Structures are given as structure tokens and as C-alpha cells.
């Protein structure tokens, strides 16, 4: 519990609960609702600009009109293209100007983000799945780690939450458990292990404030953990999705040519970008059109604890009814 107290004081929130950034599910209203309820919502810039059609600064101001509490921003730091990196750098500048001070980085070297936010007393946590990547992130100066385990939705890790904690606890930085948490038991287990907080995605999709199609929310409510499978056909690396009829028909493995390019240093980034651009369109269609187009519904094994569609405030109160600062 002491670790949790340190985290909430560091970030300035009431509960050690992060709503992870999700494409395309991180609509501004959801981000604001999580922060207003005492956790911290994380902006996914591509979702805000290209799915929900907000100018980035205007979108930030919209969120700030709904909550005065801290919000965060996700920055994917993989160097897929100069245009993408330039856009991210511009959005980071705007976020800092608008008062954002908590950042979650992923899929690349976070050094440039750390250096940029340091003069503003910004805080950077980095997504990791193994100690190898945790060590690299700490060498880049991050303040804490989002520990993505094998029950997570989206880009899942390979280790259990227990094993990942054991591997990383000696690093002496705040560790956030990401994956498999959808109810009070999971939340409490993570804190009892020693995690400083939790990051949820799937549970917050099945809320009234999340602006996705009802079919997506209902699929999460109906699913059990065994319905979650990994596919590498979205981004070239394993992604957790609900095992819909489409997934069963199309398979979960990249074809021979794709696997060949994904293995090579010079071509893997281009292959991942190809998969990602193709799948982003499908994911966006899924949340808008629902059951008529449900190719890829990302979700983690926390579906086991998602039994009804609630408000964000109700979710947080159910997760942490006895949490006291």
C-alpha cells in the first residue's frame, strides 16, 4: 500500500488507477471521466485527432473543460516515420503548454520524451514486458514502469503479473500492473503483491462514457478469459483480441512473407507499419459499425470480471471501495 501512496502523490490523483491509452477507444469523454473519478485518464493522440476529429489542442481544452484533475498522454516512440515523429513532437509541445505532466511511452526509446518534459517537472512511465526492456527504459531516465503482463489486452506481454513483478522489483522504481484486472479482487491482489498501481483498458471500454458501439461493449460483457486469443496480424507483434468468428476464419498468424520481413532489422518497422495502418482502419470500423464489422475487438483476460456496463465512477468505486489515502 505504501507504494500506491507514493504513486498517487507523485501523479496527484486519488486512486492508483490508470485508464490505459487505447486506439480507437480513448475518446475524450472517457479520458476526462476517469480523471474526474479520481484515477488518471491517458490521451491516445491518434484516437483524439483521427477517430474523434478534434484538433489536438482543442481536444485537450475540451477534456480540461470536463475535469480540472490531472490527465496523461501516451506517446509511441517507435521511429516508424519522420512524419509520425514530427507530429508526436508537436503534440507533446502542445500537451506541455496545456499543463499535461504525466506521460506514458511505449514501443521505442523514450529518451527524447524524458528530456523534453524534464524542465516542466514532467513524469514519464514506460510500457515494458521484460526486464531487458525495463533496464533500457531506466537507462533513458523514466520515472516508473507500466508492467504489461500476459493477461493484458492490446499488445500483451509473455509473463504473469507475479513473475513480472519478481523480475522488476529490484529496480526500485514504481511498478504499475497492466493486464487482467477487471474487479476488486484483481486490484487488491496487484497492490498486495507490491505494485504501486494498476492500468486498465478493457474494463473501461465497457462503460457508459466510452464512445464505442454497443456490440463491442456487449462482446466484452459476454466474453470469458478463454475467449481471448493472441493475433500477430494487427501490428506484427502479438495482440489480444476476442476470438470472434472472423478471427477463427482468418487465423491469428502472419503469413510466411510477413514473418520473413518481421524478422529483419531493416524491414520489421515497415512491415509493422503496413499491418498497423491496415488494422487501424478495421478497428475504427468495428467501433462505429459494431457487429456488422467485428474483425478485431481488442480485449484482455479481464473480461472475466466485466459483467455489466457501468459508469466510470462506478467502476472505480467497485475496484477500490476500501482504498484510503
Image (tube, rainbow, N blue to C red):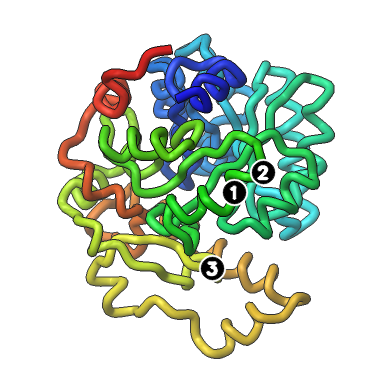
Position of the N terminus by quadrant = top left
Side of 244 relative to 240 (left or right): left
Picture residue at 72% right of the left edge, 48% below the top:
137
Is disc 2 in contact with disc 1, using a CB cutoff of under 8 Å?
A: yes
Q: Which mark is residue 237?
A: 3
Q: Earlier in the sequence, mark 1 or mark 3?
A: 1
Q: Which residue is nearer to you in this view: 251 or 314?
A: 314
Quadrant showing the C terminus: top left
Identify residue for label 2: 171
Q: CA distance from mark 2 to mark 1?
A: 6 Å
Name the residue furthest bottom. Answer: 256
For marks 2 and 3 on the same chain, the one whose residue lies earlier in the sequence: 2
Alpha carbons under labels 2 and 3: distance apart? 26 Å
Reply above or below: 221 against 298: above
Please state the horizontal and vertical placement of residue 316, each as a whole percent of the image: 32, 25
In the displayed structure, does residue 48 sit left or right of residue 150? right
- Occupied quadrant, residue 314: top left
Q: Residues within 10 Å of mark 2 (few under 14, many from 20)?
A: some
Asked which secondary structure carries label 1, the reply is helix
- Measured as percent of width and height from the top left, residue 219 is found at 21, 52
Quarter-wise, where is residue 267 in the image?
bottom right
Residue under label 1: 168
Amino acid at each position: 500500500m505504501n507504494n500506491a501512496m507514493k504513486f498517487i502523490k507523485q501523479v496527484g490523483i486519488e486512486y492508483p488507477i490508470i485508464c490505459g491509452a487505447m486506439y480507437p477507444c480513448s475518446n475524450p469523454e472517457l479520458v476526462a471521466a476517469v480523471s474526474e473519478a479520481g484515477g488518471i485518464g491517458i490521451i491516445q493522440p491518434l484516437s483524439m485527432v483521427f477517430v474523434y476529429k478534434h484538433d489536438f489542442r482543442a481536444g485537450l481544452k475540451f477534456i480540461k473543460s470536463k475535469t480540472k484533475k490531472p490527465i496523461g498522454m501516451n506517446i509511441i516512440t517507435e521511429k516508424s516515420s519522420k512524419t509520425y515523429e514530427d507530429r508526436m513532437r508537436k503534440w507533446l509541445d502542445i500537451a506541455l503548454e496545456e499543463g499535461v505532466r504525466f506521460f506514458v511511452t511505449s514501443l521505442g526509446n523514450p529518451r527524447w520524451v524524458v528530456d523534453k518534459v524534464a524542465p516542466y517537472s514532467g513524469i514519464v512511465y514506460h510500457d515494458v514486458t521484460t526486464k531487458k526492456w525495463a533496464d533500457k527504459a531506466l537507462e533513458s531516465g523514466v520515472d516508473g514502469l507500466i508492467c504489461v503482463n500476459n493477461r493484458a489486452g492490446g499488445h500483451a506481454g509473455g509473463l504473469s503479473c507475479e513473475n513480472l513483478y519478481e523480475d522488476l522489483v529490484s529496480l526500485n522504481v514504481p511498478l504499475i500492473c497492466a493486464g487482467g484486472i477487471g474487479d476488486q479482487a484483481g486490484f487488491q491482489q496487484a497492490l498486495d503483491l507490491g505494485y504501486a498501481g494498476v492500468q486498465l483498458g478493457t474494463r473501461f471500454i465497457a462503460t457508459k462514457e466510452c464512445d464505442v458501439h454497443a456490440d463491442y461493449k456487449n462482446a466484452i460483457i459476454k466474453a470469458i478469459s478463454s475467449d481471448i486469443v493472441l493475433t500477430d496480424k494487427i501490428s506484427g507483434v502479438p495482440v489480444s483480441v476476442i476470438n470472434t468468428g472472423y478471427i477463427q476464419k482468418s487465423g491469428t498468424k502472419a503469413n510466411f512473407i510477413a514473418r520473413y520481413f518481421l524478422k529483419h532489422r531493416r524491414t520489421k518497422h515497415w512491415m509493422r507499419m503496413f499491418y498497423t495502418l491496415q488494422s487501424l482502419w478495421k478497428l475504427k470500423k468495428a467501433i462505429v459499425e459494431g457487429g456488422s464489422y467485428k474483425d478485431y475487438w481488442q480485449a484482455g483476460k479481464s473480461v472475466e470480471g466485466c459483467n455489466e456496463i457501468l459508469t466510470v465512477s462506478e467502476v472505480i468505486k467497485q475496484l477500490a471501495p476500501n482504498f484510503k489515502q
